């Protein structure tokens, strides 16, 4: 989304460590939840435990991914841009695992039920659209696709904000009693989106501290 | 019929029996005990034997005494292998009690702040004998019974829980309802200092949590006020010190930490109906044929389950208590009155 060109960090150990560190940090929650389930510490419904945690984790990944461009503008630190594709792919990974958890651990692979659930429940449809959107962005996140798509790549990937909106709607529909957690994520999302408004976006680099 | 009322002579609980006969049925059963016939013998299983891994509670002496005199296994599932009692840790660690937070683990984490001693309940409305009654005085005149019921949550999971309690009918009779009493309305405690969920400004629920029953539902012998479970007093997160248990209705009807019981003429507006009338009705009878708008109610996940065995079973009409309660709803359109 930034117009700056991607400078290859290959061969630079520092950047390699940074990326590997981010990779491990993004992987860690999945390992932790699996460990909890393996040790019977995830409660009487471990499938639902995974489903909800992975879903929330995916929302975090998406929020973090979308933070990176404003952060780059604010700090000009190259490290943020270097992990954008990786975090975007993590969001896709979490979202995929979220759907898999639903199909495996909640529906128990009763595909007939999955079919009827998807059609009947609007929040599942919204979640599916968001997941398909993430998959399209994931599939076009490589250099080859960037070259092929040329000028169309940027507007396509700006769809990530729309996907964030769908994810929040999906979440909103599931909430039963207390909006506090949802409101926190919605506020974060609103903040991130606000930084992309042209007047704000122009101001960000000026706020840069040395 | 999946549950076994320890009363072999009666086919239908709702064929209302004169009180004296109803109250003497346990003695009758005691006389029958010698015949065996697969009865869960009263007194055969004592709490101390049955619930060895359950942590000791902190019940006041009067409650300990009442619990020790419990009529154990008063109502049990007909198929104990299918309806296995959930481990205590699951029943007390996985709760919807929004007064203490929205996560299933929140009540177990945060309900410790609830002061349950002393406790009193206001009985009011269309009654001749109402007033504020200390919990001890409310519960003591009744025989404690152990009722092993299926609990079906509206969220499509279920557990089997051994409650200790008294028939709600006892309390209502003692209050001497007037002829205007058509419904019973219940309220949960409101105290944001003790109940952190009530401090959230994002909560959709307007406190107090309110529930209600039609008079005949409230008087039904399966309907109890529970003071204990697993052979001990209720943990706070399960609605201590006094909660409703209506086994043929979705769990949210079984209101917790009750401070007020009112006999009223008009149908009460229960909290979930107030929040989302298109999703939750007044009756909230377990019904596999009427879906929640956001998920199917045809099946349920019996907990605890495991990752690769969701333990999904068919949901039964009236949660398997149809033989006992279906007559209450004869002629009603249960799609309309969900």
Image (cartoon, rainbow, N blue to C red):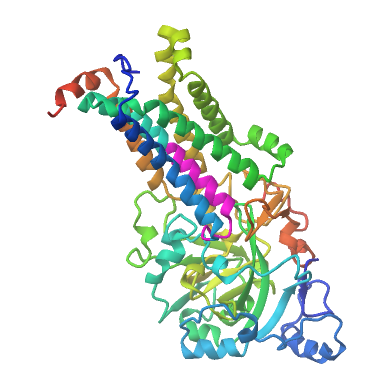
Q: In the figure, is residue B241 to the left or right of B6?
A: left
The picture places residue B142, in percent across and down from the top left corner, at: 60, 86
Q: Is residue B150 rendered magenta in the image? A: no
The picture places residue A61, in percent across and down from the top left corner, at: 41, 36
Q: Is residue A48 rendered magenta in the image? A: yes
Question: In the displayed structure, would residue B171 be above or below residue B125?
Answer: below
Q: Is residue B234 visible?
A: yes
Q: In the figure, is residue B95 to the left or right of A76?
A: right
Quadrant of the frame with the N terminus of chain A: top left
Q: Main secondary structure of the magenta part?
A: helix
The picture places residue B243, in percent across and down from the top left corner, at: 54, 71
- Residue that extends furthest to the left in the rendered view of this protein: A210
Question: In the displayed structure, would residue B14 be above or below residue A173?
Answer: below
* Number of numbered discs overlaid on the protein picture: 0
Q: Is residue B178 visible?
A: no
Magenta highlight range: A41-59
What residue is at 67 percent from the left and 75 percent from the top?
A: B147
The picture places residue A45, in percent across and down from the top left corner, at: 58, 56
Given residues A147 and B129, the one toward you in this image is: A147
Question: In the displayed structure, would residue B231 be above or below residue B254?
Answer: below
What residue is at 81 percent from the left and 81 percent from the top?
A: B39
What residue is at 62 percent from the left and 90 percent from the top?
A: B69
Q: In the figure, is residue B286 to the left or right of A198?
A: right
Quadrant of the frame with the C terminus of chain A: top left
Question: In the displayed structure, would residue A142 be above or below residue A121?
Answer: above
Q: Quadrant of residue A194?
A: top left
Given residues A27 and B94, the one toward you in this image is: A27
Given residues B306 and B192, the one toward you in this image is: B306
């Amino acid at each position: 989304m930034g117009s700056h060109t991607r400078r290859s960090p290959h061969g630079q150990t520092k950047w390699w460590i940074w990326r590997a560190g981010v990779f491990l940090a993004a992987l860690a929650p999945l390992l932790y939840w699996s460990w909890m389930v393996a040790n019977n510490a995830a409660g009487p419904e471990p499938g639902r435990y995974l489903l909800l945690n992975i879903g929330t984790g995916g929302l975090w990944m998406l929020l973090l991914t979308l933070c990176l461009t404003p952060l780059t503008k604010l700090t000009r630190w190259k490290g943020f841009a270097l992990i954008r594709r990786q975090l975007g792919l993590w969001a896709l990974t979490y979202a995929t695992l979220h759907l898999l958890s639903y199909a495996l651990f909640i529906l128990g692979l009763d595909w007939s039920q999955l079919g009827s659930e998807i059609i009947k429940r609007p929040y599942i449809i919204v979640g599916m659209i968001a997941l398909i959107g993430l998959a399209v962005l994931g599939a076009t996140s490589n250099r080859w696709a960037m070259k092929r798509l040329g000028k169309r790549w940027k507007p396509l990937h700006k769809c990530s904000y729309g996907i964030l909106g769908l994810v929040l709607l999906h979440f909103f529909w599931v909430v039963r009693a207390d909006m506090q957690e949802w409101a926190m994520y919605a506020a974060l999302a609103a903040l991130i989106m606000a930084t992309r408004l042209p007047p704000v976006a122009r101001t960000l680099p000026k706020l840069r501290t040395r | 019929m999946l549950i076994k009322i320890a009363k072999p002579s009666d086919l239908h609980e709702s064929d209302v029996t004169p009180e004296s006969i109803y109250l003497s049925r346990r003695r009758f059963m005691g006389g029958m005990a010698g015949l065996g016939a697969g009865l869960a013998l009263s007194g055969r299983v004592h709490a101390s034997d049955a619930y060895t891994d359950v942590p000791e509670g902190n019940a006041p002496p009067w409650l300990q005494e009442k619990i020790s005199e419990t009529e154990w296994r008063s109502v049990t599932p007909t198929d104990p292998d299918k309806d296995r009692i959930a481990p205590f840790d699951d029943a007390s660690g996985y709760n919807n009690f929004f007064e203490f937070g929205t996560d299933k683990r929140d009540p177990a984490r945060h309900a410790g702040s609830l002061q349950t001693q002393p406790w009193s309940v206001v009985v009011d409305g269309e009654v001749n004998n109402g007033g504020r009654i200390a919990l001890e005085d409310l519960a003591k005149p009744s025989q404690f019974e152990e009722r092993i019921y299926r609990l079906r949550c509206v969220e499509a999971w279920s557990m089997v829980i051994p409650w200790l309690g008294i028939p709600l009918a006892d309390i209502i009779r003692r209050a001497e309802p007037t002829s205007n009493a058509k419904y019973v309305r219940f309220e949960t405690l409101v105290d944001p200092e003790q109940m952190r969920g009530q401090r959230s400004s994002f909560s959709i629920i307007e406190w107090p949590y309110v529930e209600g029953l039609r008079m005949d539902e409230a008087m039904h012998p399966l309907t109890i006020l529970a003071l204990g479970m697993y052979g001990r007093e209720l943990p706070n997160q399960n609605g201590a010190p006094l909660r409703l248990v209506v086994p043929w209705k979705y769990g949210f009807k079984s209101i917790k930490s009750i401070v007020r019981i009112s006999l009223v003429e008009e149908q009460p507006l229960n909290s979930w109906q107030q929040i989302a009338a298109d999703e939750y009705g007044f009756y909230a009878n377990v019904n596999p044929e009427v879906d929640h708008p956001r998920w199917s109610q045809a099946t349920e996940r019996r907990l605890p389950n495991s990752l690769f065995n969701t333990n999904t079973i068919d949901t039964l009409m009236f949660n398997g208590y149809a033989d006992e309660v279906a007559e209450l709803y004869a002629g009603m359109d249960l799609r309309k009155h969900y």
